[in-house]
Image (cartoon, rainbow, N blue to C red):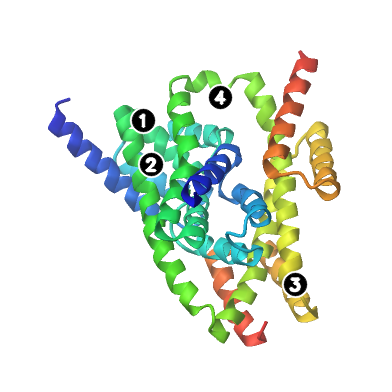
């Protein structure tokens, strides 16, 4: 592929992922339909199986899943350069929108009505988080070992105030030890 | 220097928050205790805004938190920091894709991290709950709202707008 063609290809990759970043709400699985439409049906960059693979691996690699899918797809089309462009493009709409909105909201925070609205929203968001916890719990806790881990971690968190990073490392270590014993 | 520190903290979040956007919440909550960048109350607002605006929730939250801490450059640097570890890892993993996915060591370790992460989010939710539920009106509102969210499938944006309207009506 000559240089001009690859530039045009990079431009297309950028447009596709910018659109996905701009038009999806909610992140994670909520983004899957648009990924499918744009990457599989329209551009034919990847297959259905690849998308599912990217999602399942995206859950095992650190970071935001949608960003992982963008990086994977970009890498498949144009190696490191493609991965970089796809990642930048999916992130850019968030950067612009959030910073404008945060600026506006900060100037409004003294307004009494806005304060009431956010007091309501804070409770609404917690309800959404707790629902998410239930959904995640059903997926993440399937074995007795996992249930024991869950209870241990909760206990540890309530009694000793460990940081989130410590907890992740401890759990990873527990899985490592279990695998050692099972072998 | 604030930018260096911001980058480092969000790089760590990008590296350890395994499982998607919501998982960054407990890590951001840790930051409210460690630094005076933003309060836990502000964090809850950020979660709400991040869920109601386009884009991946984890990226939105990093941008918002960075912006709140150190302005526009803060937003850019925090976002860059949270994304970088996964980009590096994914490019690396791309080369040994199928091998990595079915590796029993990787599978066992990931299966162990997931329950821990659920416990982390649960605890962060409770800590935020303590801040927001201050009287019996907000407590009743909270319980009723949770039941609604649990039993009726609507988009998060719908619920966030509804909670804002109810907050104004009830003068929460």
Is B67 displayed left or right of A135 in the figure?
left
Q: Label 1 vs label 4: CA separation?
A: 17 Å
The disc placed on residue B133 is 3
Quadrant assignment, res B109:
top right
Cβ–Cβ under 8 Å for marks 1 and 2: no
Q: Chain of mark 2?
A: A
Q: How far from the left and from the top, in percent, is residue A72?
A: 41, 33
Q: Secondary structure at mark 2?
A: helix
Q: How many marks?
A: 4
Label pair 3/4, CB-CB below 8 angstroms: no
Work out which quarter of the rendered image holds the C terminus of chain B and state it.
bottom right
Cα distance in 3D space between marks 4 and 2:
22 Å
Earlier residue among tags 3 and 4: 4
- State the image quarter where residue A12 is shown: top left
Chain ID at mark 4: B
- Residue drawn 39% across the image and 62% down it: A97
Residue in front for this viewpoint, A103 or A149 = A103
State the residue position of label 4. Answer: B101
Name the front one of labels 1 and 4.
1
Q: Which residue is mark 1?
A: A75
Picture coordinates of residue A58 (x, y %)?
52, 36
């Amino acid at each position: 592929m000559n240089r001009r063609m690859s530039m045009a290809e990079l431009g297309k990759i950028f447009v596709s992922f910018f659109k996905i970043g701009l038009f999806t709400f909610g992140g994670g699985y909520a983004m899957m339909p648009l990924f499918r439409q744009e990457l599989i049906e329209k551009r034919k960059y990847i297959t259905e199986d690849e998308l599912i693979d990217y999602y399942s691996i995206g859950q095992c690699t650190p970071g935001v899943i949608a960003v992982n899918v963008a990086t994977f797809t970009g890498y498949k089309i144009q190696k490191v350069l493609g991965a970089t462009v796809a990642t930048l493009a999916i992130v850019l709409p968030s950067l612009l929108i959030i910073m404008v909105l945060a600026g506006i909201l900060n100037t409004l925070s003294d307004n009494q009505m806005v304060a009431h609205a956010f007091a309501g929203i804070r409770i609404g968001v917690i309800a959404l988080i707790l629902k998410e916890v239930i959904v995640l719990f059903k997926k993440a806790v399937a074995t007795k070992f996992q249930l024991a881990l869950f209870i241990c971690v909760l206990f540890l968190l309530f009694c000793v105030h460990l940081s989130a990073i410590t907890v992740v490392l401890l759990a990873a270590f527990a899985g490592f030890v279990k695998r050692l014993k099972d072998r | 220097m604030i930018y260096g520190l911001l980058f480092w903290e969000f790089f760590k979040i990008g590296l350890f928050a395994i499982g998607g956007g919501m998982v960054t919440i407990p890590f951001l909550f840790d930051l409210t205790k460690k630094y005076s960048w933003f309060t836990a109350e502000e964090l809850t607002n950020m979660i709400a805004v991040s869920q109601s605006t386009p884009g991946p929730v984890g990226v939105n939250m990093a941008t918002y938190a960075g912006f709140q801490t150190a302005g526009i450059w803060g937003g850019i640097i925090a976002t860059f920091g949270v994304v970088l570890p996964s980009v590096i890892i994914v490019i690396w993993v791309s080369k040994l894709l199928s091998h990595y996915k079915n590796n029993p060591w990787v599978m066992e370790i990931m299966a162990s991290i997931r329950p821990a992460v659920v416990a982390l989010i649960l605890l962060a939710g409770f800590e935020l709950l303590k801040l927001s539920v201050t009287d019996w009106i907000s407590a009743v509102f909270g319980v009723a709202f949770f039941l609604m969210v649990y039993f009726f499938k609507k988009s998060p944006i719908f619920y966030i707008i509804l909670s804002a309207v109810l907050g104004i009506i009830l003068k929460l």
